[in-house]
Amino acid sequence: MEITPLRDVDLDAFVDELWLPAQRELAAMTSYTLADDIRAGGVSYHRKRLDSDDAITYVGSLGDDLVAHVSAAVQTPSPVYEQIRECHVGELYVDGSIRRRGAARALLDAAEQWGRAMDCERLDLNVDVQNEAARELYEDVGYRAERQNMKKPLDD
């Protein structure tokens, strides 16, 4: 798999072939409902990221097929904490046809290298509780849980 930074010229194909399937898969695991015009929102969101010096999206391809991506951005903690630079991995998606073949690990490595180049001190990410394969991968490459996000519906 070849890993390259997302380019503006590839944005529409990226959103259609990778980002939208990832969002649909994620929505199926969560209590969220996708917006009606998710595609336009995705294009706008990633176009802004392309213009940011503090964000990166890497795309994995096999030949002409886009098969995986990772997005990361530099963040700082709440102002009550020491202000360090952290690399937050906001998105990681691998097409089902190539999962468990090293693509996610290679993309995480790319995000980690980018974070180092951006003078970040650590990486962080969020993972859905039921995504056992992702949690196992993250633990295998050195991530450790520090917090847990809990939700409660407020029914009428």
Image (cartoon, helix red, strand yellow):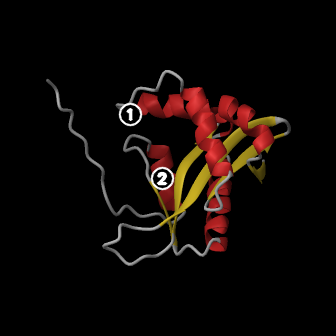
Does residue 19 appear to the left or right of 135 in the view shown?
Answer: right
Whether residue 146 can be seen here: yes
In which quadrant is the C terminus drawn?
A: top left
Position of residue 75 relative to residue 61, above or below, is: below
Residue neighbourhood size for the residue with mark 1, other residues' Cα within 10 Å, grouped as few (<14), some (14–19), many (≥20): few
Structural distance between the alpha carbons of marks 2 and 1? 19 Å
Dot 2 falls on a residue whose secondary structure is: helix
| Residue at left offset 40%, top offset 67% | 77
Mark 2: amino acid: Glu
Q: Nearer the viewer, residue 23 or 41?
A: 41
Give percent across and percent down for residue 81. Answer: 34, 74
Q: Which residue is mark 2?
A: 136
Instruction: Point out the residue furthest to the left here.
Output: 156
Give percent across and percent down for residue 128. Answer: 40, 44
Whether residue 100 can be seen here: no
Does residue 82 appear to the left or right of 50 in the view shown?
Answer: left
Dot 1 falls on a residue whose secondary structure is: loop
Q: Quadrant of residue 155?
A: top left
Q: Quadrant of residue 72?
A: bottom right
Q: Which residue is mark 1?
A: 30
User: Sequence order check: which comes first, mark 2 or mark 1?
Assistant: 1
| Residue at left offset 17%, top offset 32% | 154
| Residue at left offset 37%, top offset 44% | 129
Give percent across and percent down for residue 57. Answer: 66, 51
Is there CB contact under 8 Å for labels 2 and 1? no
Does residue 80 appear to the left or right of 138 in the view shown?
Answer: left
Mark 1: amino acid: Thr
